[in-house]
Amino acid sequence: MADITVSELHKEFGLGADKVIALENVSLSISGHAFVSVVGASGCGKSTLLNILSGIDSPTSGTVRITQNGRPARAGYVFQAARLLPWRTVMDNMLFVQQDRSKETRDRCQHYLEMVQLGDRGDKFPGQLSGGMQQRVGIARAFSTEPDVLFMDEPFSHLDAITARTLRKELNTIWAETGTTVVFVTHDVGEAVELSNRILVFAKGGRLADDIDVTLPFPRDVSDTEVAVTKAEVFKTFEDIGALAIS
Amino acid sequence: MATTLSTPPQVPKRASEEDVVRAAKRKDRITTWGWRLAGYAFFLGIWELASGRLMDEKLLPGPSTVFRTFGELWATGEVPGAFATTLGRIAIGFSIAFIVGVGVGILMQNRFLNGFFRDAVTIGVTTPGLIWALLTAIIFGNRPAGPIIAIVLTTFAIITVNVSEGIKSLPKDLIDMAKSFDVGVVRRNREIVLPHLAPFIFTGVRFGFSIAWKVTVLTEVFSSSKGIGFEMRTATQLFRLDEFLTWILAFYVLALFLDKVVLETLERRFFAWRGELKS
Amino acid sequence: MSADLRVAERTADTPQPVSVVRRIWRWITRSSLTGRLTFPVVCLIVWLLAIKVVTTIWPFAVDVLPTPGQVFGFMFDEIKGDTVAPHNMYETFAISLQRLGIGMIIALVIGTIIGVAMGLSKAVNAFFNDWVVAILAMPNLAWALFCSLAFGFGDIGPTIVVVLTGVPFVIINVREGVRNTPSDLFDMARSFDVPRERVIWHVLIPSLLPFLFAAARYAFALGWKGLVVAEVFGGQDGAGWTIKFWYDAHRAYGVVGYALLFVIFALIFEKLMFDQLSKRLFKWRPSIDAADVVEARFDAAAPLPASVAAAEAGATATSAAMGSITLATSGPPHQPVDDPSPPPPAQDAPKHPRSNDHG
């Protein structure tokens, strides 16, 4: 359960006439056992925000502080593509990101693999797994380091609807069991409503337009009425802030 | 008149940003060229130095010696004659190789003929030109048929491979689309088939040419009484390494010129759209 | 109406035996395998015919032209180890192979060092590039003649020729490997704070391996061709020298036969060695079978990391060969763009590089 404080975060690319503002003076704070979704149309800065939060990228100005009980937080990342080392087995991929290779660590990795229903595939190579399975390994890998905060960048956008649905449920279960804070970027509002207890809406130009709390009880199903209602409300917000405009 | 608003401070800032970018690009270009020239200076320098000190002048003539020798040879009038002979053989041999290569490539679209020619193409691609050079030298001796046949045998395969690739990858969907609009065969070929095949044929020609000239010179070393290869052999037998180097370098520069300057410029101009696809 | 009935009747009356013959004929003329088998037969016929024709026109050519009988007889004798030349086939090939091996190793070492440097630094690349292209385009013959004059007869000359023919290809392949390192995997490792040595060992080196492999394969294929030429001019033993031995003896069947033996030997050796190596080094490569294809289609456009795509590109020798020749002659596919601003963070490409709509 990390504490994230973002203050006047600003990011721009390019010079002169080609300048693009990816994030415009964004300020927010996250604490507690949060699952925060970042939604918005393409090009509104969602991925940029995630990259800066996770340290892959640095801001033009502004500050980011991510702490856990006062100390710097440990972070995990799940990508759009699984980003597994294709020349190592699944278990070796899990071990690659750990601090050590002790027996406890191995057991912990095995435990997380089982949480994503892949306990028996530890010795397979990523090339032998389907895309959905690879993504599950990616999720297990991220959670297995038991990070304080987990950044996820549209992890299910490349999967078919059925696999994605299963993985969402698994993600929700793992999140509920561990105490990790999750920052989850998606363009799918339904997914955001299904998984998160807070939704940040971004508009074109990297502007944080709205901040919605979702207090429905877990576990949620996409076919629940309340979920559908909340989803409609979020879309209404989109229209209000003009966030639905296509670039 | 002057409206001193907030805009003036902005404008110079933007202009200088773009200037910075342009200056950075120019500096980069200059550095690259600088290093490139440094490379030339370095390697030519080493060569020149090695010639007198590391190795006997006779064994490794430096670039200045070679240059001088070229001047001497040119003055005797041998150069144009030898070049003409060799280039003529390459031209004839390559033309035949091209026709054979394209023909076989087209024929190989049929399954039976594909099996038939497969091994021929494999042998063509993998056999060293030396073998053909020696063989044609033995069989044809001095006759001009020798080098020409050697060229055909070494080169046709690479052209066939490229043409075959091109034909196999013809965009059937585009052709079907054209057929559905009742576009005639001639126009279909001109607008779809030829533009698609052109890059493949071009690649085949480039590879083929680079192979062809090497084989020609090699064959001439063994068999001829004229041409660049023959001159190279004579120079070696007389232990005139400066002349040997002169011949090989002169021809090599010419071949490189033909390939990089002529063919590559042609390729760029005609196939600019392909470059965008590649990246 | 009645016309259709008549047609229907007619086809029903077609007698069976004819259709069987026709079917067999159709199978023969459509099959790739029969085509392949026909080729050597046709070659043999053409060969014998050509000899007949040439010897009737030029009777003195009888001595010079090799007949199939002579060539195969010669090859058979050589295989038995029964030869007029100073060494038998096996010793000779061993000598040549040794030179090839040493030359290849040297070429790989030098080439990798320079290739890595060129891949990492634009300055180094500008310095060496034109010379790499120059050496690449230089014919074997030039190296062979030069080395024979410089190093006399023996091992050194041919070995150096192998090095010279191989180095430019190694450089180009390694440079391409360095340029194609999977930045997505490096970013992933960085996001997990993986220590540097682990990243180098588990990410960098495995990602370079396919390119090194292609380089080695190319060094071998070109190396032995250069070696043979070098041995013709500058050896006192070895395959090339033996071919020249038969050439000097005016025995065309010797030239053809020995060349055939060596070429076949080199091809088999190359295939065996590299296929075996490839299986071990690259057993993680996904093999496409029917089930995978079906599953992949269901997985929509699951993206493959750039590393695997690059690895597949370096897979076969021919594609590597084509790739590196294209690289040498037309430069890398994307020129590094001079952009002083930091590039936008790597977006995962949504398109599956291997997927296609045709399945």
Image (tube, rainbow, N blue to C red):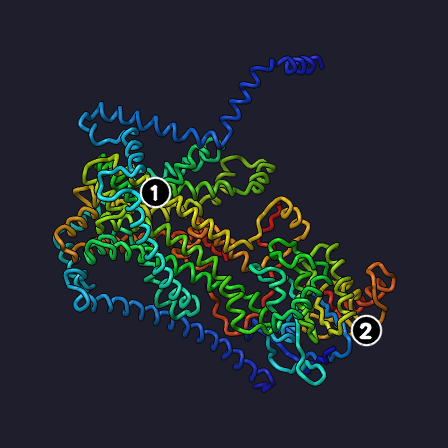
Marks 1/2: CA–CA distance? 74 Å
Q: Which percent across, then down, holds residue A24?
A: 66, 77
In-image side of C92 versus C249 (left or right): right
- Residue A173 occupies quadrant: bottom right
Which residue appears at 72% of the width and 67% of the height?
A40
Relative vertical location of residue C182 with respect to residue B222 in this rendering, above or below: below
In-image side of C116 versus B187 (left or right): left
Which residue appears at 72% of the width and 72% of the height?
A182
Identify which amino acid the numbered label 1 is placed on: Val
Name the residue tied to disc 2: A213
- Residue C343 occupies quadrant: bottom right
Residue at mark 2: chain: A
Could you tell me which secondary element the residue under label 1 belongs to? Answer: helix
Label 1, residues with CA under 10 Å away: few <14, some 14-19, many ≥20:
some
Residue at mark 1: chain: C
**Picture quarter with the N terminus of chain B:** bottom right
- Residue B88 visible from this viewpoint: no
Label 2, residues with CA under 10 Å away: few <14, some 14-19, many ≥20:
few
Relative vertical location of residue C138 with respect to residue B223 in this rendering, above or below: below
Identify which amino acid the numbered label 2 is placed on: Asp
- Residue A85 visible from this viewpoint: yes
Q: Which percent across, then down, holds residue A117?
A: 72, 59
Q: Which percent across, then down, holds residue C71?
A: 29, 33
Which of the pair C22/C281 is nearer the observer? C281
Q: Are discs 1 and 2 located on one and the same chain? A: no
Q: Which percent across, then down, holds residue C185?
A: 57, 65
Name the residue tied to disc 1: C263
Relative vertical location of residue C7 with respect to residue B259 in this rendering, above or below: above
